[in-house]
Image (cartoon, helix red, strand yellow):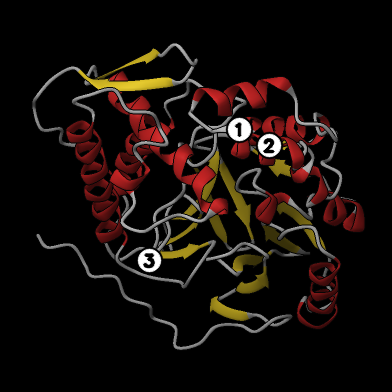
């Protein structure tokens, strides 16, 4: 059966400080974020009997707190925010969590892996870039000028765009059921984009709140960073696709970026083909040893600017580590301490 094409059933979007009801008791809110290429994040308010559940909080800026206050005043029917669920630890999702939970005297609700990673990054912030970060970027092939830029930016960017990450939280896990108003939502944990990304699925209404795990128009970022330099997140992401493929084809998807859409299976198939193409490009390029920097032109059809280059390297490493896990590449360090990747087998790789 041919997959349903991507469609966007709503003809409009909410403006700043406004909301749009996408289904009974579900409000879509859009907040501006200073992230090039994204510009906005989608946040959701779910009406409960005696309050509202907020899904994600936005990045930590005075402007977003001001917008939230206008929404609290005008659109909550006099009821409080009674629960905050953050899908994952990234600052555009968790950035206002400390302020929201204090503002409404409520706990933060997250998966264990997301809260611990966010809390760790918040606490380890420091003015100077630590040696392990410099060592990581040295090993991926950054030259002296690039390393100097890494040193100059310090190690506190995460903390600067976060309100205080709460010291405690309420844990949710894959398979949990959460009752919000008339709906029961199943927690579906996806991996790869982040450690334990929580999505919410209403089987009765066929609605998936997908966060960054499933997005229209773009693929979720899957990358390798200094905190876990030998991870294999792409493997976890591809495995997570199988879980979401079991949902009905007419599922209404409420993503964290771009527009509400249908055509879930179409997008999941695209993820598979997209990553399969990148993996095979890498295999073909690694007949001789290549660093992550060497592989950027192989993976990207445009020249990356300075800001995009680090994310490009992170994505390239994620694909290399997947191929190492499949026994297709090997990783060795050259005399300068730079990781090089070289092909082992000659067969074409297909993503299952």
Q: Which mark is residue 227?
A: none
Residue 112 point in image, percent of width and height: 65, 30
Q: CA distance from mark 1 to mark 3?
A: 36 Å
Q: In the shown orientation, is residue 91 left or right of residue 225? A: right
SS for callout 1: helix
Is there CB contact under 8 Å for labels 2 and 1?
yes
Sequence-wise, which precedes: disc 1 or disc 3?
1
Sequence-wise, which precedes: disc 2 or disc 3?
2
Q: Residue at x 33, y 43 (%)?
A: 241
Q: Which residue is mark 2?
A: 148
Note whether residue 186 is visible: no
Q: Is 234 or 24 nearer to us in this picture? A: 234
SS for callout 2: helix
Few, some or many C-alpha atoms within 10 Å of disc 2 (few <14, some 14-19, many ≥20)?
A: few
Note whether residue 318 is visible: yes
Q: Which residue is mark 3?
A: 217
Q: Is 207 or 304 nearer to us in this picture? A: 304
Q: In this picture, is 217 found above or below 124?
A: below
Q: In the shown orientation, is residue 306 left or right of residue 81? A: left
Q: In which image quadrant can residue 315 be found?
A: top left
Q: CA distance from mark 2 to mark 1?
A: 6 Å
Q: Which residue is mark 1?
A: 144
Residue 239 point in image, percent of width and height: 33, 34
Residue 143 point in image, percent of width and height: 55, 33
Q: Is 50 or 166 nearer to us in this picture? A: 166
SS for callout 3: loop
Residue 164 point in image, percent of width and height: 86, 44
Few, some or many C-alpha atoms within 10 Å of disc 3 (few <14, some 14-19, many ≥20)?
A: few
Q: CA distance from mark 2 to mark 3?
A: 35 Å
Few, some or many C-alpha atoms within 10 Å of disc 1 (few <14, some 14-19, many ≥20)?
A: few
């Amino acid at each position: 059966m041919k997959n349903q094409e991507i469609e966007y059933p709503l003809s409009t979007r909410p403006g700043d400080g406004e909301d749009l009801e996408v289904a009974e008791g579900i409000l879509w809110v859009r907040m501006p974020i200073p992230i090039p290429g994204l510009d906005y994040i989608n946040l959701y308010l779910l009406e409960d009997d005696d309050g509202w559940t907020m899904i994600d909080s936005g990045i930590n800026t005075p402007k977003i707190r001001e917008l939230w206050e206008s929404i609290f005043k005008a659109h909550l029917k006099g009821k409080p925010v009674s629960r905050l669920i953050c899908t994952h630890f990234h600052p555009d999702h968790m950035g206002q969590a400390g302020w929201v939970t204090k503002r409404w005297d409520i706990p933060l609700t997250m998966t264990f892996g997301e809260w611990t990673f966010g809390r760790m990054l918040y606490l380890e912030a420091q003015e100077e870039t630590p040696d392990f970060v410099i060592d990581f970027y040295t090993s991926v092939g950054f030259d002296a000028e690039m390393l100097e830029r890494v040193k100059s930016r310090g190690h506190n960017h995460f903390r600067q765009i976060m309100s205080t990450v709460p010291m405690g939280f309420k844990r949710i896990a894959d398979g949990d059921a959460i009752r919000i108003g008339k709906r029961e939502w199943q927690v579906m944990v996806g991996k790869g984009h982040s450690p334990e990304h929580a999505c919410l699925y209403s089987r009765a209404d066929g609605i998936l709140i997908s966060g960054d795990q499933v997005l229209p128009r773009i693929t979720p970022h899957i990358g390798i960073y200094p905190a876990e330099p030998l991870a294999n997140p792409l493997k976890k992401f591809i495995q997570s696709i199988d879980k979401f493929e079991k949902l009905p084809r007419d599922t209404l998807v409420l993503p964290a970026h771009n527009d509400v859409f249908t055509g879930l299976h179409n997008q999941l198939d695209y993820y598979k083909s997209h990553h399969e193409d990148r993996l095979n490009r890498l295999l073909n390029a690694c007949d001789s040893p290549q660093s992550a920097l060497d592989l950027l032109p192989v993976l990207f059809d445009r020249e990356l600017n300075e800001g995009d280059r680090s994310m490009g390297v992170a994505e390239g490493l994620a694909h290399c580590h997947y191929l190492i896990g499949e026994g297709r590449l090997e990783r060795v360090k050259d005399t300068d301490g730079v990781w090089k990747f070289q092909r082992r087998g000659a067969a074409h790789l297909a993503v299952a």
